[in-house]
Image (cartoon, grey):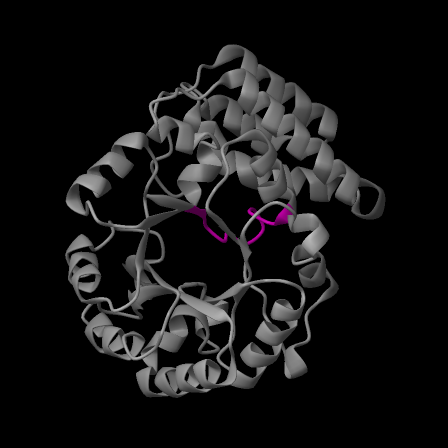
Amino acid sequence: MKYYMAPMEGITGCVFRGIHHSCFPAMDKYFTPFLSPTENGKLTPRECREIDPERNKGMYVVPQILTNNAAYFIQTAKTLKSMGYKEVNLNLGCPSGTVVSKGRGSGFLAFPERLDAFLYEIFSGLDIKISIKTRLGKEKPEEFQRLMDIYNRYDLEELIIHPRVQKDQYKNTPRMEMFAWAFSRGQSPVCYNGDIFRAEDETKLEEQFPSLPAVMLGRGLVACPGLLGEFAGHRSDTRLLREFHDKLYEAYCQEFLKTSGQKVVLFKMKEIWCYLYTSFRGGEQYGKKIKKARTLSDYNTAVSAIFQNCDLIPGGGYGGTP
């Protein structure tokens, strides 16, 4: 089984994945939070920093592109190839209302004919590996039958399926019957993504799909950065988690403190703690204190308290949307 780090906007950026890579077993692939190109494939300074090869050394990084404009996708993919990237990923999974309203992300799934034409154009115009991260549809999982017919026409490097529809957001449970249907009919390698929070979740998935080649980990990996070790039967270590936290905190301070102030550092760290506190037994009260911190001093006091007073939950602990 191969394991991938999911693209989580605002969380699994180059700083996070670099620190994670230095502290824990390597993921097979690291997907960047989406790049959103405009005319001529132009990217923002922040996006350029995100894909800077110097910031992604030693990792197999896959830049993800969010667009419904084939020309923008092609130009951006060519730029990424010139930088040394071997694979790009098309985002057809983002359920955000602002993205969907523009017909991008999972909103693009509501227009299968346009999507087919888009895919034909980018596969005709590029010689780089292209994978797709998709949901089952916009409103009903049955939409995926039509979408799968389209995906099977193209030589995808991989089809990463999050078995929810856009309207589900991250609620309800993954629609495993439709995933099983898709897995049995996919012409390209299929990767599973969705609600793998604990070692037992991964075991159950492998038992159900023993030939599944890959799993993408998102919220569960942020909540339990040592989740791969848990899969192998190695209990997460509080000391190592603290080391990971401290390296990440220091990196964010170096990145943002002088230019943007402590509010940005607090925001970045608090986003991670929305998930991370759930891996601590009795961590909820400390998670609230971290959330309420208004200064870095208050934040560090609250973080020290959770590490001193709470044990990690074996197997990972996250179980729902924060």
Query: Residue 223: percent from the left, percent from the top?
Result: 45, 34
Instruction: Relative to 98, say whether 122 is above or below.
Output: below
Instruction: Give the camera-side residue of 80 and 112.
Output: 80
The number of numbered badges drawn on the structure is 0
Q: Which residues are magenta?
A: 4-14
Instruction: Relative to 194, say whether 106 is above or below.
Output: below
Assign the magenta stretch its main secondary structure: loop
264 left or right, relative to 96: right
Residue 171 part of the magenta segment: no
The residue at the point 55 percent across, 11 percent down is: 308
Query: Residue 83: percent from the left, percent from the top?
Result: 67, 65
Point out the image quarter for the C terminus. top left
The residue at the point 43 percent across, 19 percent down is: 312
Instruction: Give the camera-side residue of 157 and 301.
Output: 157
321 left or right, relative to 203: right
Instruction: Relative to 90, say whether 240 is above or below.
Output: above
Residue reaching furthest right? 258
Point out the image quarter for the N terminus. top left
Q: Quadrant of residue 206?
A: top left
The residue at the point 20 percent across, 64 percent down is: 182
Q: Quadrant of residue 130?
A: bottom left
The residue at the point 51 percent across, 66 percent down is: 88
Query: Residue 105: percent from the left, percent from the top?
Result: 44, 69
Residue 322 in view in this figure:
no
Residue 5 part of the magenta segment: yes
26 left or right, relative to 254: left
Query: Residue 215: percent from the left, percent from the top?
Result: 34, 48
Residue 153 in view in this figure:
yes
Instruction: Give the camera-side residue of 239 and 97.
Output: 239
Q: Quadrant of residue 305?
A: top right
